[in-house]
Each structure stands twice: as C-alpha cells, then as structure tokens.
Image (cartoon, helix red, strand yellow):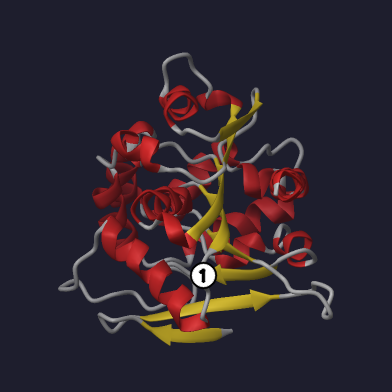
Amino acid sequence: MNFLTTSDGVRLCYFIDDFTDPWKPAQTAILLHAGMGSSARWYAMAPAIARHYRTVRLDLRGHGSSQVPPVDLELSLARLTQDVRELMDHLGIANAHFICNATGGYLGQHLAATSPERVKSLALFSSTPGQKFSGSSAWIEKIERDGLRAFLDAVVGDRLPLDLVDPGYARWYVEETAKNDTPYILRLLRLLATLDLSASLSDIRCPTLVVVPGARNTPGGPYSVMAAKIPDVSMIYHEGDPQSLCDAFPDRSASEALAFLASLSKKT
C-alpha cells in the first residue's frame, strides 16, 4: 500500500504488482476500477497482468483506501483524470497501457483524448462513452431512499452471474462495494449521470479494445458509437453476460487484455 498527495491535497492510495522477469525491461499497465469499486476488486485479474507488466492499481479518490475529498473541493472528470496524471508523474511513468473497468474507462477515454502521449493503449471493459447511457440517474434515487448496501443487494444479480459464481464471492462483492462513503458515491453519480464522451471518441488515437457485455450490445447504442468513432478499435461482444465483466469473468478478461497487448507488440 502506497500513497501520494494530489495537487489539491487529497491522499490517494495505490498498489504496485510486478512479477515480470527481473532481467528484462517491463512496460507499465495501469488499472482503473469501476465506480463504487476499489483496487481490491482487481484481486483476480492483477496477478495475471502483473506477470507480464508492471501493474499499478489506483484507488480513485473517495474509494477504497483513498481519502474521501472534502465537499468544498471540485469534483469533475478533469480532476479525476488529473489524479491519474499526477500518479504517473509521481512514479516517473511517461506513458502506460490502461486497463479500465466501467467508470474507470471514462477516465481512460478522457486521458487518451486529452493527453494522448500518456496512453499507449486502452482496454475498456463494460465502459460506454459515459454514464449517461447507463441509467444511473435512477440509482441515485434508490440509494438515497434505501441506502447503498440495500441498493447493491438489489442489483448484484445484474452485475454478476449468480448461478455461476461462488455465493461467498457475491457476498464479498457487495460488502466490499458497500464500504464506500455513501454521500461521496451519490456526489460522484450526480456528476457522471449526464457524462457523454461521444464527441471526443475520435480523438482517441491509441489502439483500443472495447469488451461489451451482451445486455448492452444494441444496434445504434453507445458501443456502436465507439466502434464507429474510435479510429483504431477492436471489439469483443459477450452476448448475455452481466455488466461487471472484470468481476464476473476475471480470468477471461485478463486473457483478453493480455492477448490485445500481445497483438500490439507483434505490430511493432
């Protein structure tokens, strides 16, 4: 567990996993988790990635072991993305591959569009061009009414295949997610509820992988926009899979990310 303090005074937690061959130079992969998640939710994917890449897992501000920012501090996509830049500067990382889950992908997309020199490639799992397309405005009302834990209990079946995963894992997923600060999560959801990055997709010039849960694969939908607008994009569709691909299918997701990254090395 490591920490840095951002330029606006928020203490962020991050982890480094590196099981690459010590006699070879290693590239860096930065993992950005979903909203309401934390770096702990990468526990199954990170070991596979870290065998091939120096892997950095950040707890986004207000999540996991990172500080919940004071309410008088600006909360914006630009600030969340600046946290990633500052982490890279702190670690001396000029550029990196990014593997992003859901909300983490909004940061990855924004960073790739606004600071292309920092992003070697982008792997997006269950990440549309913004939460405007997820119906999250309804989540806000339910969390305000029922509380975060009750909300998670009600939607866990939409996020995980409960007939396939260990029941203990489903409980852990809910408990881990419910640790987050509810007022901050509501604040974040209100920020993201209208987020639409569609107009900047054509500015993402790095090789990009988009992995789509089947329930969101609709003609003319947000993933179709990504397929059409991102210049160097590869798409993988998983028909019928629930939303949280990295949590529901971590081994498969790690394999897909690694295969994508391996394909890039063959091009160079």
In the image, residue 57 sits, relative to residue 263, either above or below, namely below
Q: Which residue ends up furthest to the top in the rendered image?
A: 219
Left or right? Give the position of 37 relative to 129.
right
- Residue at disc 1, secondary structure: strand
Left or right? Give the position of 81 relative to 266.
left
Q: Quadrant of residue 31?
A: bottom right
Residue 61 visible? The answer is no
- Determine the residue positioned at 68% across, 44% down: 248
What x and y, as percent, mark residue 91?
52, 81
In the image, residue 240 sits, relative to residue 231, either above or below, namely above
Left or right? Give the position of 116 relative to 160.
left
- Determine the residue positioned at 47% across, 49% down: 105
Please state, as top left, top right, bottom left or bottom right, where the N terminus lies in the image.
Answer: bottom right
In the image, residue 197 sits, relative to residue 29, either above or below, namely above
Q: Which residue is mark 1?
A: 58
Q: Which residue ends up furthest to the left in the rendered image?
A: 72
Foreground pick, 251 / 161? 251
Label 1 packing within 10 angstroms: few (<14), some (14-19), many (20+): many
Residue 252 visible? The answer is yes
What x and y, as percent, mark residue 2?
54, 85
What x and y, as percent, mark residue 104?
47, 54
What x and y, as percent, mark residue 160?
63, 41
In the image, residue 162 sits, relative to residue 64, either above or below, namely above
Q: Which residue ends up furthest to the front in the rendered image?
A: 268
- Determine the residue positioned at 84% across, 74% down: 21
Figure disc tally: 1
Q: Amino acid at mark 1?
A: Leu
